[in-house]
């Protein structure tokens, strides 16, 4: 198995260049997956992320598994230098990836060495189980989901916006109390990022 490279963010994209520089070429092509937010009418923050990546010098191309077949999505992953999975509703993200057959394509690509950048829901979905996000995201908004088992690329479930910037501190603390004993949780603040390289996890400024 190739060395895996993941950058997990709560909000800001500042760490992206330093993460990608050692493992990709300058001006590399990033496949942007907007799926987690497809159920929301306001996509302003997605446009901001695309613009930010462009300003950082990357070529950004949308990869939308809800509009592509599984084979086409897998081929598209082979044509990019990194995959970026945006935030939104974690349950919808996982459900939509499964319905499209894109979950396995992402896992296979990342395990083969494709760098993965995940923000908020995109960071949470790579863990072992997204059930602990139940107090932070609305399950009723999600695509059909028969299991909350995540992509399993890391051994912890990331809880983004840990300082309460989305929904306040109450749901975050309730998540800690309800799920902390049965799940390995990592509470990630907006000013932090997680870098995972071949199973080793370290926290850096975000």
Image: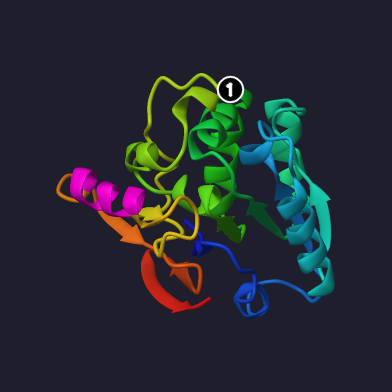
Instruction: Report crowding for label 1: few under 14, some 14 to 19, many 20 or more residues within 10 A (C-alpha).
Output: some
- Of residues 32 and 2, the one drawn nearer to the viewer in this rendering: 32
Residue tagged 1? 99
For label 1, the SS is helix
Residue 95 position in % (x across, y down): 53, 27
Q: Is the magenta stretch mostly helix, strand or loop?
A: helix
Q: Is residue 159 left or right of residue 140?
A: left
Let me know if residue 90 is in the magenta part.
Answer: no
Let me know if residue 171 is in the magenta part.
Answer: yes
Name the image colouring. Answer: rainbow
Q: Which residue is drawn at 39% across and 48% down?
A: 127
- Of residues 21 and 121, the one drawn nearer to the viewer in this rendering: 121
Residue 115 position in % (x across, y down): 60, 61
Q: In this view, does 194 lie to the left or right of 93?
A: left
Q: In this view, does 35 lie to the left or right of 94?
A: right
Q: Residue at x 39, y 55 (%)?
A: 158
Q: Residue at x 34, y 40 (%)?
A: 129
**Which contiguous range is marked in magenta?**
170-179
């Amino acid at each position: 198995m190739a060395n895996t490279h993941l950058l997990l963010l709560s909000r800001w994209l500042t760490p992206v260049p330093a993460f990608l520089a050692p493992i990709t070429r300058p001006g590399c092509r990033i496949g942007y997956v907007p799926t987690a937010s497809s159920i929301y009418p306001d996509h302003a923050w997605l446009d901001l992320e695309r613009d930010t990546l462009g300003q950082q010098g990357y070529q950004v191309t949308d990869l939308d598994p809800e509009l592509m077949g599984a084979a086409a999505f897998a081929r598209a992953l082979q044509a990019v230098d990194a995959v970026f999975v945006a935030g939104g509703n974690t349950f919808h993200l996982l459900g939509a990836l499964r319905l499209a057959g894109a979950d396995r394509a992402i896992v296979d690509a990342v395990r083969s060495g494709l760098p993965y950048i995940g923000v908020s829901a995109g960071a949470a979905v790579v863990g072992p189980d997204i059930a602990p996000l139940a107090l932070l995201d609305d399950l009723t908004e999600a695509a059909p989901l028969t299991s909350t088992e995540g992509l399993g690329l890391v051994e912890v479930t990331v809880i983004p916006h840990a300082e309460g910037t989305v929904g306040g501190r109450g749901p975050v603390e309730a998540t800690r109390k309800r799920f902390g004993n049965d799940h390995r949780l990592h509470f990630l603040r907006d000013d932090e990022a997680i870098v995972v390289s071949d199973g080793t996890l370290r926290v850096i400024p975000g």
